[in-house]
Image: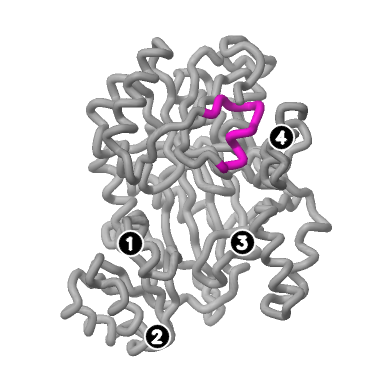
Amino acid sequence: MMRQGAASEVNPTGLLTECPVVVLNTHHSGLAVARDLAPFGVRVIGLTAVAQFPGNCSRLLEYRPAPDSLTEAPALLDYLVRLAGELGQRAVLLPTRDHDINFISSYRAVLDEHFRIGLLPPLDLERVMNKDVLAITAREAGLRVPRSVTVREPRELDQARELRFPCICKPLYASQWRQAGVWDAVGRQKARRVETFDDLAAYYTGFSHLDPLITVQEWVEGGEENLLVFGSYCLASHEAAGFFTARKKVQYPPLAGTGIVVEALPLPRLEQPSRALLRALGFRGISEIEYKLDDRDGALYLIEVNPRHWDQHGLGTAAGVNLSELLYRDMTGQPLRAMRQTTDCVRWIAEAEYGRHLARCLLGRAPWSDAGLAFGAVRTWAVYNSGDPGPFLSLLGLRSAVGRA
């Protein structure tokens, strides 16, 4: 569905919007990019191979079916080159998933000719995407990182015996487990908690023949509310031009899944280590840094860094810090607008996933207190938006009503 209105204009904030944005994915993250930028008059084109994504029905972006970056990379490259010719200028190209990052890195030389790319160059990305390299850099910058071992082949698994269990088992590169066959073999989870070495060995046996490269990391004690987030946009100086902080309230699968309820609130403790890490990484662009507080001693441990838009980045906009706008201004050479996070608690909720979580509450499989998280705070939803009802109608299975919304 095409966004109505001019694609080149000057809005009250002084933002010049003649440069389009092409976003890879129209699910939560891509839809949020459109809602961040389209109200200013920016033309946002959303590409996806998934016809059912709710964002395809948004009036704020132009949905276009396109090859997938994971399974059809050469075809997507051809598609993007043709799109750049159609646009007649170098649009901003934004990844939203790890395999989008891998795709862009693989074809960076070609894509740089046609797009402004909101992503670090491949060599710099390695320091972020490789969990071993990231851990070394973080420790050198003064951050705590859980002890871990990297296993490259089955005979190396015994190295994990030296760790304190329980542990978390995950790929060295997040995108590894999204490959054909591997995702099902690992239980369709991005990480897995294992209680003992024997549990680890049994789990590893189920997929090591497909991809033996893993990281086994000591578990940081604490529940989901101990998971803290620092989201920011960094300039070429590697300094954060704007940031917000948040904590997870609910994720699924529990303990090692994706956030489905996340709330923004000021967490001053995160600023200094996050800025230090971003400088040490030589970082530029959007990122989400995730930490966990250890219940045993209150220590703050680095968990991971996502060098791209992520599902809940729109929470920052709701809390006063529009990271997509900062990126757009920087990449199009425009002055940045000062932004500061509100002191109010703002809660982001993925409504479809939260609905399934409510069912678990009713069945006694999740805390009953989670049923009240949709109330009592300023809320922003992953899909629902009163000014852009099409995605939510689509989520409800009412696509026939989208054209009338």
Q: Which residue is mark 2?
A: 165
Say whether residue 139 is magenta. no
Vertical placement of residue 194 versus 183, above or below: below
N-term mark: 1 or 3: 1
Q: Nearer the viewer, mark 3 or mark 4?
A: 4
Residue at 57% across, 10% down? 8
Q: Which residue is mark 3?
A: 248
Residue at 49% across, 28% down? 64
Q: Nearer the viewer, mark 1 or mark 2?
A: 1
Q: Tell me the distance, in whole angstroms, between the alpha carbons under discs 2 and 4.
A: 52 Å
Is 244 displayed left or right of 112 in the figure?
right
Q: Residues within 10 Å of mark 2 (few under 14, many from 20)?
A: some
- The magenta stretch is 52-63
Q: CB of mark 1 within 8 Å of CB of mark 4?
A: no
Q: Nearer the viewer, mark 1 or mark 4?
A: 4
Vertical placement of residue 305 versus 81, above or below: below
Which percent across, then down, holds residue 15? 59, 17
* Amino acid identity at mark 3: Lys
> In what element is the residue under mark 4?
helix
Q: Which residue is mark 1?
A: 181
Q: CB of mark 2 within 8 Å of CB of mark 4?
A: no
Vertical placement of residue 110 versus 157, above or below: above
Tally the marks: 4
Q: Which residue is mark 4?
A: 400
Q: Tell me the distance, in whole angstroms, between the alpha carbons under discs 3 and 4.
A: 35 Å
